[in-house]
Amino acid sequence: MDKRAIDRRLVDRRLAGKVAVVTGAANGIGAGVAQAFADQGATVIRVDLDGCENTCDLTDEAAVAALFARIGETHGRIDILVNAAAFAVFGWIEELSYADWKRTLACELDIVFLPTRAAWPWLKASGRASVINFASANAHHALPGSPALAHCAGKGGVLAMTRQLAMEGAAHGVRANTISPGFIHTAATDRHLAADPAFKAQVLAKNMLPLLGEPQDIAFAAIWLASDEARYVTGADISVDGGATAW
């Protein structure tokens, strides 16, 4: 086997030997990342509210603590944590109830904080761990036609939280970064497109690239951030948004 073939094989198994927990793994971006990580050789623990082998309400402190204790005790460490689970209520400020505001912030912020805190001892045990959180293009700009006030607040919080995690984790070999997706074609976003046929044109008008993203576009970025190739990358935010926030 020549050197190029050996190198190609290594690249195609970039996460071999790593233990990865992916939340929100039943659908959309989380499902795409979980499958890509498995294809790259990682041992993947999929977590979601339902539809996965590990079901958990990730806003329930006790349930999250119990789940990650079980994962950590089984595997001895967690090398990668991908916090892809999220939920948001979309509404203009005049229409957004306080209950929906609080629910969105819990399902954008608590749903990242609780798993990360529960996983932290196991991430430290890895010695070269990677936390990947999801901010959003909405954390950087307002999209005309999108009633995303609570979502913008939540994802802006994830962006700031991750920078702090990068600082706190650095001494323990724990890197923390965000990916900020633009509009990604999933079952959830299909509902937005169906509800407002003009919305796709508004999204594409903000993009430099005239297409919508797919979960695999995010998965490729996540593979790199999770791999040892990104060992010098922490506190960073990677925009994968077709150029929407680069104007």
Image (cartoon, helix red, strand yellow):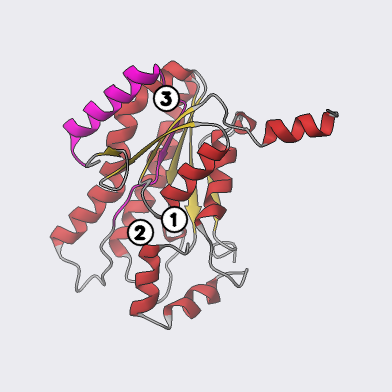
**Residue range corresponding to the magenta coloring:** 59-87
Q: Earlier in the sequence, mark 2 or mark 3?
A: 3
Residue at label 3? 78
The residue at the point 49 percent across, 18 percent down is 127
Find out whether the residues at labels 2 and 1 contact each other: C-beta distance under 8 Å.
Answer: yes
Instruction: Specify the label residue 136 is tagged with.
Output: 1
Q: Between 84 and 92, which is closer to the camera in this rendering?
A: 84
Q: Does the image show residue 121?
A: no
- Quadrant for residue 45, please give it: top left
Q: Secondary structure at mark 3?
A: loop
Q: Earlier in the sequence, mark 2 or mark 1?
A: 1
Instruction: Specify the label residue 152 is tagged with.
Output: 2
* Three-letter amino acid code of the residue under disc 2: Cys
Q: Earlier in the sequence, mark 3 or mark 1?
A: 3
State how far apart marks 2 and 3 are (Cα): 30 Å
Q: Is residue 68 magenta?
A: yes
Q: Is residue 37 magenta?
A: no
The 10 Å Cα crowd at callout 3, few under 14, some 14 to 19, many 20 or more, is many
Find out whether the residues at labels 2 and 3 contact each other: C-beta distance under 8 Å.
Answer: no
